[in-house]
Image (tube, rainbow, N blue to C red):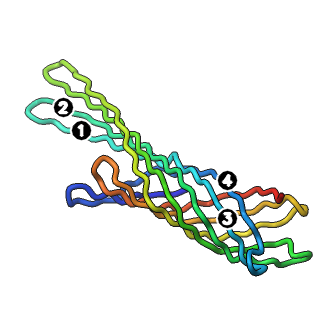
Amino acid sequence: MHSEPDVEFGGVSDSLETDTGYAGGAGLWADKVGVEWISLGVQYLNQQGFDFSETASGTILGATITGTVDLEPTINSAFVNIAARGHFGKNKRFHPYIGGGIGVARSQVDASVTATLAVGGTTFLIAGNADDDDVTLAGQAFVGFDVDFTKRVYSGVNVRYLMTDANLFGADVEFRNAIGMAVLGVRF
């Protein structure tokens, strides 16, 4: 998973360069809804590990200040999806698809700040933690394929682009996450 959230605070905006995270989820799908090539589904998706950390230091009037900010976002979302799904190959076992969904996302960020202040040979430590969350509308677009191994078991891959905005710690944050996932499914 790759994410570089855009943050706007006090009229200033910037993109955060985050770590590559990971995602996992579960879904239920109904195939051949109305016509053979339409599938409808509901999905839960969890994204995390795309952390941000920044350290800076400086000296002012003989005092050295060093500080670190660590942000750990987590996004839990639920979607209603629609997909156009093909059936190709021998016994129609290969299924490419493209689709999208709309839902809600709970974006949460755990923040920790540490700073040291060194003055005249004495060092002071300042540390604090805080968290904030917001529940907002979310959307996604996806493309992928799966292959039937048996009549009930299939596997595949998909790539999705998730979009949600949140207000966290008074800042407007735009999450635009590209996610690649392996899929394992069982038909009931």
Q: Which mark is residue 26?
A: 4
Q: Quadrant of residue 65?
A: top left
Q: Is residue 35 depicted above or below 167 in this figure? A: below
What quarter of the picture does the C terminus occupy?
Answer: bottom right
Discs 1, 2 touching: Cβ within 8 Å: yes
**Residue at coordinates 47% horizontally, 51% vertically from top-left?**
106
SS for dot 2: strand
Amino acid type indicated by mark 3 = Gly
Using the numbered discs, state the Cα–Cα distance from disc 1 to disc 3 in whole angstroms.
50 Å
Q: Which residue is mark 1?
A: 57
Q: Is residue 141 left or right of residue 125?
A: right
**Residue at coordinates 43% horizontally, 51% vertically from top-left?**
18
Nearer-N-terminus badge (1/3): 3
**Residue at coordinates 41% horizontally, 44% vertically from top-left?**
109
The residue most toward the bottom is 35
Q: Nearer the viewer, residue 25 or 35?
A: 35
Discs 1, 3 touching: Cβ within 8 Å: no
Q: Which residue is mark 3?
A: 41
Nearer-N-terminus badge (3/2): 3
